[in-house]
Amino acid sequence: MSDVVIKVKVAKKAATPAAHPKFAEMIQEAIVVLKERSGSSVQAITKFVGAKYGSKMPPTYPKLISNSLKKMTVDEKLVKVKASYKLGDKLKLAPKKKVAKKVVKKVVKKKAVKTAAVWTLK
C-alpha cells in the first residue's frame, strides 16, 4: 500500500509594521541629538533609544542596537572611534528634506500713461 501525503498550506499572517522607526534611523537620531564631540558610546545610544522608544521596543533591543551599529560601521554609515560612534560621510552627506519656501511674487503696477489732450481749435 502506498502512503499518501497531503500537504496543507497554512496562510501566513501579514507582518505587522513595527511601532518604532528603523534602528538605523533611531541610532542616527541619537548621535545627532547627543552631540558628543568624540562620538556617542553604545551605552549612551542605548539609553537614549530606551528613553524615547522604550515602551515600543522589544525586550532584546540593546542587542539589536549593537548589531545595527556593527552593520552600519561595515556599511561606512558610522565611523568607530575607540569605543564610540560618529556619523560617517554617507549619513553626513545624505540629502535633507527640503522645506518648500514660499515664493513671494512682486506685483509690478503699471504706471498709467497720461495722454496729452490735444485740443484743436477750428
Image (tube, rainbow, N blue to C red):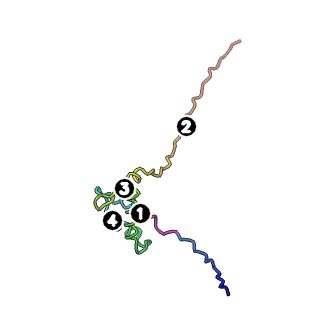
User: Which residue was labeled with disc 3?
Assistant: 87
Pick whichever, 8 or 110, lies toward us: 8
Are the two marked residues, 1 and 4, in contact with CB atoms closer than 8 angstroms? no
Q: Amino acid at mark 3?
A: Leu
- Residue at 28% across / 60% down in the picture? 82
User: Which residue was labeled with disc 1?
Assistant: 26
Looking at the rendering, in which quadrant would you find the C terminus?
top right
Mark 1–mark 3 Cα distance, whole angstroms, equals 13 Å
Mark 1–mark 4 Cα distance, whole angstroms, equals 13 Å
Q: Quadrant of residue 2?
A: bottom right
Q: Quadrant of residue 48?
A: bottom left
Q: Is residue 79 above or below residue 5?
A: above
Report helix, strand or loop for mark 4.
helix
Mark 1–mark 2 Cα distance, whole angstroms, equals 46 Å
Mark 4–mark 2 Cα distance, whole angstroms, equals 56 Å
| Circle nearer the N terminus (1, 2) | 1
- The numbered dot on residue 47 is none
User: Which residue was labeled with disc 4?
Assistant: 42
State which mark lies toward you, 1 or 2: 1
* Horizontal and vertical percent position of residue 49: 38, 67
- The numbered dot on residue 107 is 2
Report helix, strand or loop for mark 1.
helix
Q: Amino acid at mark 2?
A: Val
State which mark lies toward you, 1 or 4: 4
Q: Amino acid at mark 4?
A: Val
What span is colored magenta in the figure? 17-24
Report helix, strand or loop for mark 3.
strand
Sort mark 1 into few (<14), some (14-19) or many (20+) by Cα contacts within 10 Å.
some
Mark 3–mark 2 Cα distance, whole angstroms, equals 46 Å
| Circle nearer the N terminus (1, 4) | 1
Q: Amino acid at mark 1?
A: Met
